[in-house]
Structures are given as structure tokens and as C-alpha cells.
Image (tube, rainbow, N blue to C red):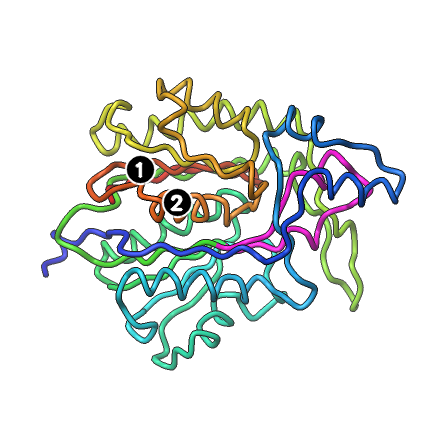
């Protein structure tokens, strides 16, 4: 295979959700014990979220990532030992270090010394990781790459703040990319603007064995909404232009599953009917870097996404980061 002929294709998808499913009403009942008022109607009207999953106390991001990876490898029909690169997108790693990717490598029983590292771009993380893996494959450096998004956001939520604690959930999703002579990933576009770092952040760190700053998620909801709607349309058009395709070529749109209003607004601006948009935010909540691969796996396994169709994924996240990847299944 010559370098000029190398492309990367998705050959397997997988996902994992922790067993504990929490409906809006269950969450509202729990919050009421803290004196925090909310309701199913209030949450659905503002976000489209009806339920989310929370990890068990002894369950980590790497645990969920490993389960999603196993399912993606099974669909791909390759063994974990065939992997030569693992990239994990996460903002909630098990540890400060080592990377979650190294922990997943060990849990998969891989002993071939394949490279492994994490990507931190929050909710855009999976798009960043996919684009990174694609470039490694195109460069001829790697052949089989496992790309994972995994999060335990429930650990960084302030359950005294109803504006954020009702939004997020835990889970993991994965894809296996493989070098191919046939085009798979058609184009990608990634961006960041650190001047907006304060509108979505967890402004804390470990210093002297204790947390310095704040260890809970902070979000300026209105600012994030306005910026997200603006950049998602632009980055989608950028990816389409790079691929030389019109927006009518998109068979499926999988936006980051943060807020149904943002998602429908983006689809509308792209001229896509809502029927072409994969929606799982209602059942998963916002799972940050895990949301796109979770939604992708759901739509692949239920038969909506078929071989040969063009899929656009896009996300926005703290940083502020945003990105899009257009690929053919």
C-alpha cells in the first residue's frame, strides 16, 4: 500500500453505559432532599434530556472505555493485539497520570507496546481524537487505531446547582479505524479559542495533596449556547468544503449531544431535516467526549447508518474548542 493511497475507515463501533439509569423525576426527587427544586418538565423543556446514566462508585472512565472498546473490536473483527495506537478523549481521567489510554491498553491485555495517549478537548474531544487518528493513519504511521470517548462527569458535578447537574451523564463510546485503499474519513476541521476558557470549565488543580480552586464544573449556559450555534454551522461547512461536497451529501448528522435546542438549530442551518440527525441526548444526557461515539454506535447497531453513507460528526467543548469530521461508513 503506497502512502498516497492510504485512507482511514471506521470498521467497528462500540459503546457502554453504566447500569444506573436516572430519570429526570428520580433526579428531581434526589435534589429535593437538598432543597433544590426542579422537575421533569423544566429539564425537558430546556434541554430535551429525559434520563442519564451514572457510574457506580467503583467504576472509572477506563473501565467504561474498555467495555466500549471490546464491543468495537468485536464488530471490527480484529483482536486487541492488532492495535498499534490507542487514543482516549476524556476530561475525567482515572488519574492525573498515567493516561486513561495506557490503563485501557492494560485492561485489554495488550502487550505489543502500541502507543497510547489521551486527548483533552472536553466535548469536542472525540472529533479531535478522530482527526488525530486519521492523520496518523494517512501518514503511514499506524494501521489499526482504537479511538475512545469516555467520561464520568457525575464526579465533577455540583448537585447544589440545578443549572448544570441535570445536564450530564456518564458513558463511553469507541470506534476502530483501519488503513484502507478506499476513502473513509473525507475531511476534518478543528479549532479553539482560549479567550472563552471561562465560560465552561472546572477551574481547579491538585496542589500539595489538595484541590486548589474549584473541582466542580462551571458553565455560563447562555454564552455557551450562543457560541455553539455560531461555530457548529461554520465548522460543518468547512469540513464539507475540504471534502468537495455539498451539505446535501450528508446522510446523517451526529452533533455533540448537549442540548436538543442547539442540535436542532444546527441541523436547520445546514438545511437538514431532523430525521437525518441522530439524537440520544434524551436518554444519555450530555456525556461530553463520549456523546458522539455513543450516538454513532446506537445508530449503526439499529441499522439507521448503513455502509456507504456519509456521516458528519461535530462538537463544541470547554477551551473553547470545536471541530467536525466527515466520513463515509
Horizontally, is 56 left or right of 179 in the view? right
Q: In this view, does 46 lie above or below 88?
A: above
Dot 2, how many residues are within 10 Å of its Cα: few (below 14), some (14-19), or many (20+)? many
Task: Give the image location of residue 38, x and y in percent.
Answer: 78, 32
Mark earlier in primary sequence (1, 2) = 2
Image quadrant where residue 186 sits? top left
- Marks 1 & 2, CB-CB < 8 Å contact: yes
Q: Is residue 254 above or below residue 55?
A: above
Q: In this view, does 188 lie above or below 138?
A: above
Farthest bottom residue? Answer: 111
Task: Give the image location of residue 152, x and y in percent.
Answer: 62, 55
Q: Is residue 163 magenta?
A: yes
Looking at the rendering, the stretch of residues picked out in magenta corresponds to: 150-172
Q: Which residue is drawn at 70% across and 55% down?
A: 155
Dot 1, how many residues are within 10 Å of its Cα: few (below 14), some (14-19), or many (20+)? many
Q: Which residue is drawn at 57% across and 54% down?
A: 151
Q: In this view of the protein, can residue 203 be seen by the observer?
A: yes
Horizontally, is 255 left or right of 281 in the view? left
**Callout 1 secondary element:** strand
For residue 311, which numbered disc appears in the image? 1
**Callout 2 secondary element:** helix
Q: Which residue is drawn at 32% across and 76% down?
A: 81
Quarter of the picture containing the N terminus is: bottom left
Q: Does the magenta stretch include residue 143?
A: no
For residue 296, which numbered disc appears in the image? 2
Horizontally, is 318 left or right of 162 in the view? left
Who is closer to the viewer here, 193 or 143? Answer: 143
Amino acid at each position: 500500500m503506497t502512502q498516497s493511497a492510504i485512507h482511514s475507515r471506521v470498521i467497528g463501533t462500540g459503546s457502554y453505559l453504566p447500569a444506573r439509569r436516572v430519570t429526570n423525576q428520580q433526579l428531581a426527587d434526589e435534589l429535593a432532599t437538598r432543597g433544590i427544586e426542579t422537575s421533569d418538565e423544566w429539564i425537558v423543556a430546556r434541554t430535551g434530556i429525559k434520563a442519564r446514566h451514572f457510574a457506580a462508585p467503583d467504576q472509572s472512565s477506563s473501565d467504561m472505555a474498555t467495555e466500549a472498546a471490546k464491543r468495537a473490536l468485536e464488530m471490527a473483527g480484529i483482536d486487541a493485539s492488532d492495535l498499534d495506537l490507542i487514543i482516549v478523549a476524556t476530561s475525567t481521567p482515572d488519574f492525573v497520570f498515567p493516561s486513561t489510554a495506557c490503563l485501557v491498553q492494560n485492561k485489554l491485555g495488550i502487550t505489543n507496546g502500541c502507543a497510547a495517549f489521551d486527548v483533552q478537548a472536553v466535548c469536542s474531544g472525540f472529533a479531535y481524537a478522530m482527526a488525530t487518528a486519521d492523520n496518523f493513519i494517512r501518514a503511514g504511521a499506524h494501521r489499526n487505531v482504537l479511538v475512545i470517548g469516555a467520561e464520568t462527569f457525575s464526579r465533577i458535578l455540583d448537585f447544589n446547582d440545578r443549572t448544570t447537574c441535570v445536564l450530564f451523564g456518564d458513558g463511553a463510546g469507541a470506534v476502530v479505524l483501519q488503513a484502507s485503499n478506499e476513502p473513509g474519513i473525507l475531511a476534518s476541521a478543528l479549532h479553539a479559542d482560549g479567550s472563552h476558557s471561562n465560560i465552561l470549565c472546572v477551574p481547579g488543580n491538585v496542589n500539595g495533596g489538595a484541590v486548589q480552586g474549584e473541582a466542580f464544573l462551571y458553565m455560563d449556559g447562555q454564552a455557551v449556547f450562543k457560541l455553539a450555534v455560531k461555530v457548529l454551522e461554520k465548522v460543518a461547512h468547512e469540513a464539507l468544503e475540504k471534502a468537495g461536497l455539498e451539505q446535501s451529501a450528508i446522510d446523517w448528522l451526529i452533533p455533540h449531544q448537549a442540548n436538543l435546542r442547539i442540535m436542532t438549530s444546527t441541523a436547520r442551518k445546514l438545511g437538514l431535516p431532523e430525521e437525518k440527525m441522530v439524537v440520544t441526548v434524551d436518554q444519555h444526557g450530555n456525556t461530553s467526549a463520549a456523546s458522539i461515539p455513543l450516538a454513532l454506535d446506537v445508530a449503526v447497531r439499529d441499522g439507521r447508518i448503513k455502509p456507504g453513507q456519509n456521516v458528519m460528526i461535530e462538537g463544541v467543548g470547554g477551551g473553547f474548542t470545536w471541530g467536525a469530521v466527515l466520513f463515509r461508513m
